[in-house]
Amino acid sequence: MDIQLTDGVVTLLVRHRIKQGQDQAYETWLRQIIAKARTYPGHLGIDVVRGHSGGLGQFTSVLRFASTEQLQQWLDSADRRELVEQARHLLADGDQTEINADREFWFTPQEVGAPTPPPRWKQACVTFLVILPLTFLVPQLWKPLFAQLPWLGGYVQANVLITLSIVLLVVYVFMPRVTRLFRRWLQPHSAA
């Protein structure tokens, strides 16, 4: 299995192309393995992107764990081995795991073997579209608390809280959804 350290968080990228007519069975299996992974120590979350590759459904999962050891426990677990074995008959290309050499997980091409991520200008446009409204909205949401607790509204404290809020919203809430929404524009030549 391939894992990557990213600022203290370990990330595993898993791609599964699903055999024709097996998407619903795979969705059922996916819910089971996600629920099981969540029970493991250090699990920080998973993003699943649904798409198509070569006329087949493709599911790209980005799993994050708090440490290499904790991810390794999940990878080596009997639970994961048994669940992957149960799904093997659904998978067109087997259990594909890989390291992503850059940190552009939001912009990872959805096709196995896709040559490049979207152009950086498209990545910048989508990122700007997500961050700009948050830079206006988040400070306004914090304003009442800063008024009640003036020490929290100091220059450093306020900027730390506002920036942290924006980063968490971007990473965990908005970017996964927005990149799914714009996936055709980001990857205009992908097979539908």
Image (spheres, rainbow, N blue to C red):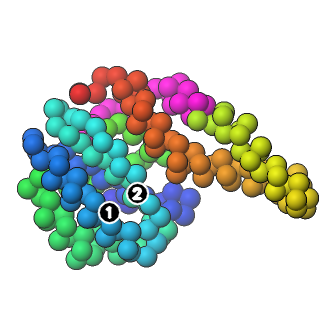
Locate residue 135: give its quadrant: top right
Residue behind mark 1: 34
Residue type, numbered disc 1: Ile
Q: Tell me the CA gap for discs 2 and 1.
A: 8 Å
Magenta range: 111-129
Where does the image place residue 179, in percent across and percent down from the top left?
44, 36
Residue denoted by label 2: 46
Task: Pick the residue in front: 21 or 184.
Answer: 21
Magenta-drawn stretch contains 122: yes
On the question of residue 153 being in view, the answer is no
Q: Quadrant of the C terminus?
A: top left
Q: Is residue 136 visible?
A: yes
Report the amino acid beneath label 2. Ile
Which of 57/74 is in front? 57
Q: Which label sits on residue 52?
A: none
> Does residue 21 show up magenta in the picture?
no
